[in-house]
Image (tube, rainbow, N blue to C red):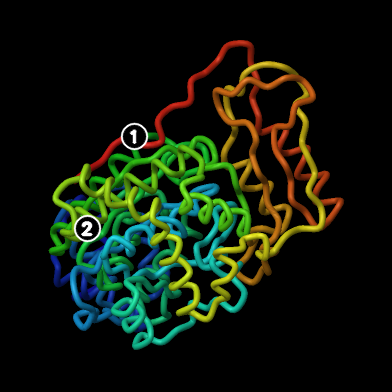
């Protein structure tokens, strides 16, 4: 078998067999197939596409290119949630303790933020002492003991995906549905969950800008997961404005804690309830989404969801008192209001611009080596559909640097679109695929 022949076959519109795909992936990971040939293959796939069988074989080959986590020693159905990322997306911080408090087993691998989208691990490190650098044995024990554990992705997990993504990133071949879906799902399948709920975001702050593309990606990933023998559900959610009101690591942690106390923003709470209901149904704990929603409401009302977050933080070395006293979380030296320059209705907030503002303040990474200021960020006071008077506060900026504050303020004002006519805020949940 030669890589040259496989490139020509795909270029000419042919379908690759499972054996051919495994030859290609194994050869590339082992260094036997050079970058220039794999680049040519990725470009051929970009233009020709892959069918359902090819996409599944590619996903499994990447998943099996490294360590496949064996979670069989965890009692019960293991359920995972994956978000395609967005601005203010602190969902895992509130969602996972809610679902675990209802009896689900959550064994989750998460990442750090890069660019204008934040990472779950960075946000969790707002808790003093918290670490996701735990052994597989500790990971499994924590899930068995308290129902939840989150760790960073190991280097041994789906190494083919890391190599391929880096190559696609510099050869303009990222934006292909089969390649995106297989990249995400290879990591999820390698992580060992029995049931996976996807949060596929669409809008100005999401990777998928168009709603139809988000639905297509969700459908592709659900199909892959089902073909691989997993229980799958996908929620398509809006990311045309920031989720909730807080953008920035410690600020988002505080908002997640408020949500576990029943005091979270309406859009964020609704997303957590919808995803949580799907997770409980997928795990077989609830018969339907109505029963699941009632279970989630109960663990918020009786405080067990908040207590579960504290248990989780303590189990991974963090200071659990910060859960009950969020005022001890990192705070910036400067809290500066941003005033509306005019009167009218908020018609749009350019979501990715708000994320970039947080990045400018130091709340995100420009490169993988960048350090993060956990205390900085933005708290929105007005969102789409709200009326604002001239001179009224649009947002608060939390900063530790006057120059960054000024740059952020100018950019944040440009992200707001204010008009005479009211534009109703759309639903946060755009659809559910099963």
Real-space Cα distance between discs 1 and 2? 26 Å
Relative placement, left or right, of 227 versus 98 is left
Q: Which mark is residue 430?
A: 1
- Residue 130 visible? The answer is yes
Label 1, residues with CA under 10 Å away: few <14, some 14-19, many ≥20: some
> In the rendered view of the protein, which quadrant contains the N terminus?
bottom left
Can you give x and y, in whole percent of width and height, for residue 7 in the image? Answer: 27, 62
Label 2, residues with CA under 10 Å away: few <14, some 14-19, many ≥20: many
Residue at 41% across, 52% down: 84
**Tag 1, which secondary structure?**
strand
Query: Which of the 4 image quarters holds residue 250?
Result: bottom right
Q: Which mark is residue 12?
A: none
Residue at 34% across, 60% down: 184
Can you give x and y, in whole percent of width and height, for residue 283 in the image? Answer: 20, 60
Q: Nearer the viewer, residue 416 or 34?
A: 416
**Tag 2, which secondary structure?**
helix
Can you give x and y, in whole percent of width and height, for residue 187 in the image? Answer: 33, 68
Residue furthest right as drawn: 402
Disc 2: which residue = 55
Relative placement, left or right, of 262 versus 24 is right
Can you give x and y, in whole percent of width and height, for residue 219 in the image? Answer: 23, 45
- Residue 41 visible? The answer is no
Residue at 39% across, 67% down: 164
Q: Nearer the viewer, residue 62 or 294?
A: 294
Is residue 44 depicted above or below 415 in this figure?
A: below
């Amino acid at each position: 078998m030669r890589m040259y022949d496989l490139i020509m076959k795909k270029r000419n519109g042919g379908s690759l067999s499972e054996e051919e795909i495994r030859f290609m992936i194994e050869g590339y990971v082992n260094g036997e197939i050079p970058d220039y040939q794999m680049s040519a293959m990725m470009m051929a796939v970009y233009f020709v596409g892959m069918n359902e069988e090819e996409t599944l074989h590619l996903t499994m080959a990447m998943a099996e290119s490294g360590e496949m986590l064996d979670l069989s020693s965890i009692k019960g159905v293991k359920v995972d949630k994956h978000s395609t990322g967005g601005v203010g997306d602190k969902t895992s911080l509130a969602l996972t303790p809610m679902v675990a408090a209802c009896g689900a087993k959550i064994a989750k691998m998460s990442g750090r933020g890069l660019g204008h989208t934040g990472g779950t691990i960075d946000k969790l490190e707002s808790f003093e002492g918290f670490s996701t650098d735990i052994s597989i044995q500790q990971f499994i024990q924590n899930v068995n003991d308290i129902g939840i554990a989150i760790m960073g992705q190991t280097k041994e997990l789906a190494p083919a995906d890391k190599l391929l993504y880096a190559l696609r990133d510099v050869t303009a071949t990222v934006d292909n549905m089969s390649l995106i879906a297989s990249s995400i799902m290879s990591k999820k399948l390698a992580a060992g969950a029995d049931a996976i709920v996807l949060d596929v975001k669409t809008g100005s702050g999401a990777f998928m800008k168009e709603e139809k593309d988000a639905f297509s990606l969700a459908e592709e990933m659900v199909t892959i997961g089902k073909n691989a023998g997993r229980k799958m559900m996908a929620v398509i959610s809006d990311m045309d404005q920031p989720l909730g009101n807080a953008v920035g690591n410690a600020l988002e942690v505080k908002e997640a804690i408020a949500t576990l106390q029943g005091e979270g923003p309406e859009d964020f709470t609704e997303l957590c309830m919808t995803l949580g209901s799907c997770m409980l149904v997928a795990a077989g704990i609830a018969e339907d989404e109505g029963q699941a929603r009632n279970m989630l409401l109960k663990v918020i009302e009786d405080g067990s969801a908040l207590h579960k977050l504290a248990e989780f933080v303590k189990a991974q070395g963090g200071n659990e008192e910060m859960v009950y006293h969020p005022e001890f979380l990192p705070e910036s030296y400067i809290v500066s209001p941003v005033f509306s320059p005019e009167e009218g209705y908020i018609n749009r907030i350019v979501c990715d611009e708000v994320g970039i503002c947080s990045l400018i303040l130091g709340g995100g990474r420009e490169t993988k080596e960048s350090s993060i200021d956990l205390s900085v960020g933005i708290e929105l006071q007005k969102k789409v559909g709200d009326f604002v008077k001239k001179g009224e506060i649009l947002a608060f900026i939390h900063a530790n640097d006057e120059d960054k504050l000024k740059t952020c303020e100018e950019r944040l004002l440009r992200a707001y679109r204010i008009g005479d006519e009211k534009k109703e805020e759309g639903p946060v949940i755009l659809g559910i695929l099963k």
